Image (cartoon, rainbow, N blue to C red):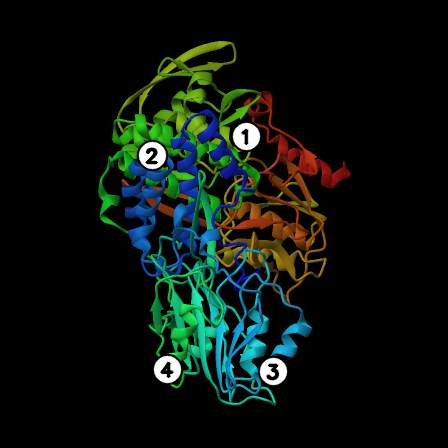
Amino acid sequence: MNMGYSLENYRVIKLIDSRFILFIFSFFFCCPPAISAKSDLLDVARLWRDINYGHPNLAEDRRIWDVSLIDAIPKIAAADNLTSLESGIRSLMKPLSDPGVRVGSDLPDESDLVQRREKFKLIEWINPTTALINLHIGHPLSESEFEEALLNLRKSNNLIVDIRPSSYNEFSVDNLLIKLIEDLISKEIDIPAEQYRFSSGERPMVDNVQSGLYGGAITLDTRRIFPSAFARKKNVVFIVNDVGIIPKALIAMQKRGKAVVIAEFDKNFPRADPVATSYIGPVRVEYSSGRLVDREGVISFKPDIILKKNRDAGKSSVSVKIALRYFGKIPSPYKSRGGQLFPIGTERSKYLAAPYPSIEIRQLAAIKLWADIDQYSPTRESLGISWDEALIQCLNEMEMVNSELDYGIALQKMTAKIGDSHVRVWSKALNKYWGQGDLGVQLRFIENSAIVTGLDNASSEEKSLFQIGDEILEVNGIKVESQLKRILPLVSGSTNERRIFDALGKMLKGSVNDNLKITIKRGVEKRQIDLSRREVKDTSNSVKSSPSTVRFLSETVAYVDLAKLEKRDVDSMFSNIEKSDGVIFDLRGYPLGTAWEIAPRLNVRDTYGGPNILQNFITAYSGVEKLKIGYTQSIKRTDKSIYQGKVVVLIDEGTISQAEQSALMFEAANPVTFVGSRSAGTNGDIRHIVLPGSVTVSFSGFEVRHADGRQLQRVGVQPSIIIKPTINGIRSGRDEVLEGGVRFLQTRQ
């Protein structure tokens, strides 16, 4: 990281910049540059994302940034030349009220560098007690040259320090300036610290939920300058301009009333805060990525004297002559302009209520969704460029939708690309589209067929019409294959098996009391079933039923249904099974939070660490890239007996979220054997984002890994012994996965 007064990262687009070369080539040799609306909007989305999550001026309210994008999108999309594109970008950046913003032609170029009319001299004596030191940025100095200059300057009483850049190379004078200041102060001064926003995810929608880290501010450590043995009070004037970044040590001197600062500029105010850079098409955009703070609050740089920019340097230059007038006129130390950075989470705005927003607000919704997933989703890295492509496709669709439902469907199609089975999308129109009515029938995709596997929540009428093992052929005259083709593009799945599982859960849904005509196959016979949908409790994670919570399958093999076992019954469960040779924990349903009590009782490894929980750490600080923060889920110690038998865990695509967390905790504590098929690959605390039109999207907020670091999400827990149900097995009432677990415990095969 180079936050010093180096111009390499802050100058105008160079001719070596490939994007600029392409622009010049197309302009002079082909045709005027074609501004690609869609590719530029992708660049706009990236800029909007980076500023939304990092800009200090958005710490308290990001809504103005949403509105700014809404207003700027038509201007940027309609831009047909570089001038109109820059104008659209400036309108986007204006609400930030950021003096650090530079857009395209605003950036400095060679004409902004100081020019010398005579041979360069590091020190020029104006009179016997007054010296000018030319610490022009970009003019390399050796350490010996500078040390010799310091010795000469110690006899001066008045000092002018000109740090206006003379070149765009990477030479920084920050450390040299600090050495110089050590000779100019009578007691120590602190250099301002850099402060940045950070975020790690959206807040949960329920206020009393405390899970993970959401956002805040980080303040970097800074440096204290101590007086040298030769330090004595002098009259000091600094000369700066709007090229580059004002050194923090200079600001410390000025703020303590130790120096006067003369600033030359025309339209661009000199910058002191850290700066970040982005591109929209060929246009370079710079803006503040953080702010400067000290013990008193936020520092806003204010020059003491403002001059029109000129390029002359040396003791005969206008700026130096003016500087001579201000010796002995040190201004009163100025105060910081406000308190420390204090981020406030708020995302509500009036536009959220409109069920069918305007095209610009619909595009904002797509960009907000893209940005949130891009920053926070644990699956983002595995999506690659396809997530950018998903945004482009959604922006295209937003131009064509003509109803509230079409708008919701376009967003749901985009979320299907996330690859996360925690993703759900709600809106008034979507809720009506999918309907609240259903049947109490559980379906699974077995041997490429939709098979009835459970009737736990079926009504008496449904139980009289369906049998376990029935194959669903058609729903309302539409074949199952066609139903899945309609639904699957709207379903996000961590694995293909879980995606189909969730799609089957939507296949029978619709409005309450609407009639359903279902064609089934029972044996060789086809039947049509006519009945009405009703309100049914969600059973999407219930794929099997068992007669009791804890039971013995043989004299030596115990079975525990973790979808039924409650926390208060964990100790009694272990008392019941303690003499068994082996136990089968069934995780093919959703557990009741018992893993934290069970894992310590299985901990024959005597380990403290379970699964690894990670979050993305998003900040504008350029020294941090792709940082994750996290912790290891601990397995607490227990003074109760540790189960000594063999442990088998049953899993399949119904094993999701907390069920997978349980599996990871069990395997960390015990050499368990997983039997069945791979789990859903979906875990991590659920986060929500509310989009315009009151569309709510949920997704996984944490990355969860095995205790040994292996990936879980989009991979799933892998079975040691693969066993999948068969249609014949289902129809004959067998639980083939459970049978496989028993067989392993009895034969170790």
**If you read the primary sequence from the N terminus, does the residue marked by circle 2 or circle 1 appear first?**
2
Picture quadrant where residue 720 is located: top right
Mark 1 neighbour density, 10 Å: few (under 14) some (14–19) many (20 or more): some
> Is residue 583 visible in this depiction of the protein?
yes
Q: Which mark is residue 79?
A: 2
Towards the viewer: 497 or 307: 307
Disc on the earlier residue, 2 or 4? 2
Identify the element where label 2 is drawn.
Answer: loop
**Disc 1: which residue:** 496
Residue assigned mark 3 = 152
Q: Amino acid at mark 1?
A: Asn
Image coordinates for residue 650, horizontal then vertical, percent: 61, 40
Q: Amino acid at mark 4?
A: Pro
Compute the Cα span from label 3 to label 2: 57 Å
- Marks 2 and 1 sit apart, C-alpha to C-alpha, by 42 Å
- In the drawing, what numbered circle is on residue 333? 4
What amino acid is at disc 2? Answer: Ala
